[in-house]
Each structure stands twice: as structure tokens, then as C-alpha cells.
Amino acid sequence: MARVSFETVHEVITEAFIRAGMREEDARTCARVHTESSCDGVYSHGLNRVARFVDYLRRGWVDAHARPTIVKEVGVIEIYEGHRGPGILNALFATRRAMAIAAEQGMGIVTLRDTTHWMRGGAYGWLAADKGYAAILWTNTESCMPAWGGKNTRLGNNPFVMAVPRDKGHIVLDMAMSQYSYGKLQVTRLKGAQLPYPGGFDQDGRLTVEPGPIEQSMRILPIGYWKGSGFAILLDALAAILSEGLPTNRIDPIGQGSCTGCSQVFIVFDPRQLGGAKFSEQVADSVAAYVNSSTPDEKSWEVLYPGQSTLRIRAEHRANGIVVDNGVWAEVMALAGRRRL
Amino acid sequence: MARVSFETVHEVITEAFIRAGMREEDARTCARVHTESSCDGVYSHGLNRVARFVDYLRRGWVDAHARPTIVKEVGVIEIYEGHRGPGILNALFATRRAMAIAAEQGMGIVTLRDTTHWMRGGAYGWLAADKGYAAILWTNTESCMPAWGGKNTRLGNNPFVMAVPRDKGHIVLDMAMSQYSYGKLQVTRLKGAQLPYPGGFDQDGRLTVEPGPIEQSMRILPIGYWKGSGFAILLDALAAILSEGLPTNRIDPIGQGSCTGCSQVFIVFDPRQLGGAKFSEQVADSVAAYVNSSTPDEKSWEVLYPGQSTLRIRAEHRANGIVVDNGVWAEVMALAGRRRL
């Protein structure tokens, strides 16, 4: 592990993306989102994901120069074709457009069809909250998880994001429908450790805390067993319907990596036009305070709301540099054509 | 157990509600929703819940004659004050009003503040889907579950509903944020059985499948551990913000049973104004078919989408009578002032 400043990480990822064919401004924007993800401790979609994105660009699975075009406008809903442009650029566009509609109408919805991996979904929730908006966002994905009662993968992990703005720290949920990601299974296996709670079934149908057998069976567990399975199914259907896009069963045959061709929904509310910013703030503060006032359990010394620890990690990384894995950092440096800083 | 026809159950519950002070038409409407819940196999909010609702009416916790009044209209959003009227009537009003807005604008949102228990949340999802609409609905509640890492109750189970219409059977998810309801814990304990998966912590912080110790500790488990905890927190904050209503931390001090004073959100989409009814139907069919095409696991012989088994139970109960618990039925008959049918 090493520490690298935010600015340096941002610069190096930007260079990697430019070398992969992106325009400088676009590269800088995408690199910023990857850097912020690592800075917030979400390594899986930060530095760790740079090489794979570059690979997708080179394979032509992501079109570096495509931009969303409008398909249809119905009231406060706008549907866009994503043309398999960079998922981050498409999702930033969609979030900002939904905020603009919300600023005029109290709420706005933008849907994106035929887009690509948005990387860290939470990025768009934090963005909306930073501007004073509340948001509900989700994407569907290729299948990676069985439906409840099934053995073979039929459901995406369909990340789902909710954000409520708050001066003292936004409340932001960013969760996939699987209890653990394959990334978490891999990291846990490489450490020779077990999962804290069962993460899936082995190939004989036994619930297990061992990551290896779950990676092999691909029978990862939906959150809440049958409940997360159902939630994933509904998110998938509604994303495809609202975006006039593809559901998981039609993303799977594309077979171009993760999320290529996926459907996304960006619902944004402007609390300033409802009960007002002050009321919204008071509600959010009281919700956060109520959670924080919990008596910690046997394993905890404090009880946090979603997003609370993110701000701590962010501040620590901003002050002392982002923690980077040496191997991952060397890989990104190489993609940027650098031998040393 | 006995079997009673849909019509008789409906008639007897109607009489019970009239005797509790409701106008006949309102009693009939509320009784229909309770009857449909039992008919769909959701006994907890069907016949089983009649006595408690009557009790709330008699205590004045629910105002039988209150009707929602509009607070504010912002674009496609309408906010209503529920005046603690019957939760079913308020929620039916809100769903229908959101459908009417959606019919004109592609989507509509109605929020309700200061309402009361809507009973089975899925009822409003099925209603919207029956009329060809997709929906996302939720309510907050009094706290009944600790936040993740906490010991004492801080979160509502905040039922969350999603519905997608489909001629061959709607896809409808109706899930609370807790892995199991207290009702399920009680029923399991009375049978002397264990939960199929851990349902919470005992008072010493051990995860357990024994219902009794969880009922005592009130440390029921959120779906997906930390994930469902976060989801419940965001649903609560957003419901209160969008309805200008109360979050869980301000419902708790009211102390008038379950959900009195709660905040609800009804988001309704009209697929006919987006990709069209035919496109929506094709997407929904393909999603359902993909799930159904799963290879069943070791414990299953088929894999179903949310709502699929509901239609089977409904058809069976319509054909052969609703299965009623003798004790519960006798109680409802007594509330209706009947000795025998």
C-alpha cells in the first residue's frame, strides 16, 4: 500500500484515459469520478476499475466519443439513448439534466438506455445531494446472481442509490442487490478469510461463509434472500420500461463485459420546492441523529447512517493521500505511459 | 381452519367496520381491501388485522370520517394531509390521484402526511398494475428494528412496494425492511418451530433462528444486514421530506399503535405514454420468463417472480373459499355482532 495525493491520482488516470482515446476534457471528467471513488474508499470502482474501462474502450465496447441523444420527452421525464458512450459521462449528463428539470418542476426523471457501466452509482447520488437535491437512482446489469430458488444466474446485482442532502453530511445509500460483490468474495478468498455472514450457496446448495465455493457456483446471495431477489427483478423490469431499453435477459446475450447496453433511471427531487430546504434539513438531521443515538451493540462503538463513514475516509484521504494498492497503482501508471511520478 | 366465501368475508368485515363507526360505503371499501389481502394469502393484514383497526377507530387513533386535503401542488407532485383518516381510504385516494396525474403527464406522485396504517402495501401496487400503471410506493412506520450496529429500535420496517403491469400476471414486490415481521416470529414460536434463516439477535448479540429471543430483544434483522438498515433510513427521510410529514423519530413519540401519523409516497408511471403498453408488456414478459426459466435449486421445483404465487392463492381462494383461522373468524364475527352466518 502507498499514499498518493488526490491530484496525482486524478492526473495519472486522466493520462491513461487520454492514451486510450478519450478527449482530454472527457478523460479528466471520468478520471475525477474514479479518483473520488478511491478517495471515498470505494476502490472497486476507483483505481481498481481503470484498467478494465481502458480495455472496454480499446475493444470498442465503450464508444469514447458517443453522447446521449434524446429519444422522448413526456412531462418531467426525458428518455435518452446512451449510444454506449462512457457510462460516467452519460450518468453525469443524466443526473444534471434531471436536476435541471427538478429545479423547474420540483422533480425530474431522466432515463438512459443503451449506456455502459456507470462505475460507482453513489457518485451521482453524492453529486445530486451536493447541489441540494434528493435522488433515487438505479441501473440494471448483466446477470450475476440466481433468482431465489434457482441455481443459475438470472438477476443483475442492479445497484440502487438513494440520497438525501444535508449540510452536515448527506445521507447516501449505494447498494447492490447481492449481499457481497464478486470483488469482495475474491479479496476475502485471497486473504484466506471467511465472509462475516453467509454470502451464497456452494454447488451443493449449502449456505456458506467460504468465498471460493460461491465464486465457483456463482450462487451469490441476494440481500434478504427472496426479498432482494424480488427487488432486483422489479428494478430490472422498471429500468427497461422507463428507458425503453434492455432488461437483463437482453443484456446477457450482448456479452461485452459488465453493464454494456444497460438501462438506468435517475429520479431527482428538489426539496426547496416542496417543504423547503430548511424543513428538509431538519428532517434529515433528525433522522441522522436518531440513528446516531442508538446504543451500540456488542461489536460496535458507534452507529452510523449511510454515507457517514464515507466523509471520514474522504477527509483522511484528502489530508494524507489516497491509499493505493501498489500493484493496481503500477498498472494504472503503465496505462498512463509513466514509469515514475 | 375453515373456508369462507370472499363475499361473506367481505360482508362480515363491512358490518364490523360499520359498527365501529364507519359510513357504509367507507366500511365496504376498507373491508374489501382486508378481504382481498386474506384472499391473496396475506392474512396478517387481512382478517387478522380487523380487530386492531376497529380498536384504533374506537380509541380515536384513526378518524373514520377524515379525508385527505391538499397541502401543495408542485408540477406532477401533490402533497396531501391525511388527517389520520383510515389508512386504506387515504392510500386508495393517493394511488388513484397519482394514476390520474400519470395519465396526463406520464407520471404522477402523491405524498401523504399524517396518515395511518395502509394495511397491505401491496394492495396499492396491485391496484395500479390492474389499471396498467407501474408504481413505486412506500411508507415509513414507528421504529421496530435497530439500525445496523445498534441494540435498540431506531428504524421502521418501512414497507416498500414496486409493481409492473402485465396481462399474464403483474410483477408485484411488497417487502418490509425487516427479514421477518413480528407476526412471523410469533407464528413460528407458537408452532414451536425455527426460522428458516436467522431473523435477528438475542439479547446477548447472537444471531439466531429462534423466534422467542428475538421477540424479547426486539433486535430483528434488516434484510441484507447493513444494507436494509441503510435502505430503511433513506426511505424514512425521503418519505418525510416529500410529504412534509413526520420521520420515524417523530412518529415514535405519538405512541398510538402502528403507523399512526406516518408519511407515504406514491410514485406512479404510465408505460402507455413512454414506450407504449405493448413494449412494456414485452419487457415484463421477458423478465418473468427469464426468472421462470431458472434451473430450480435443491429445495425448489420452480422459480417464481414476485406476485406469481399470489395469483395462484387468489384463484384457489376464490374457487374454494378463503382459508380463515377459526379464532380470528370468531373474533371478526363478534365485532360484526353476529353469532353465526
Image (cartoon, coloured by chain):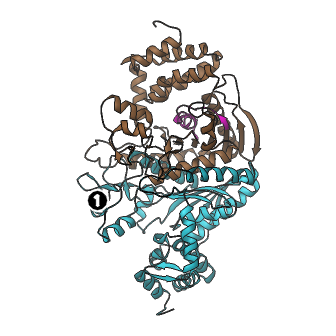
Chain colours: A brown, B cyan
Residue A11 % position (x, y): 53, 14
Label 1: state its secondary structure: helix
State the residue in front, B35 or B5: B5
Q: How many marks?
A: 1
Please state the extent of the stretch shown in magenta in the rendering: A113-135
B119, A71: nearer the viewer:
A71
x, y percent for residue B105: 74, 52
| Residue A173 image offset from top left, x and y in percent | 48, 42
Q: Residue at x 60, y 43 (%)?
A: A248
Vertical relation: B147 (above or below) A67: below
Is residue B83 left or right of A240 when viewed as pictured?
left
Decide if residue B187 is on the left or right side of residue A55.
left
Amino acid type, residue under disc 1 in the picture: Ser
Q: Please tell me whether residue B9 is drawn above or below residue B102 in the rendered image.
A: below
Q: Quadrant of the N terminus of chain B?
A: bottom left
The residue to which callout 1 is attached is B217
Chain bearing tag 1 is B
Nearest the viewer among B205 and B154 is B205
Residue lying furthest left: B204
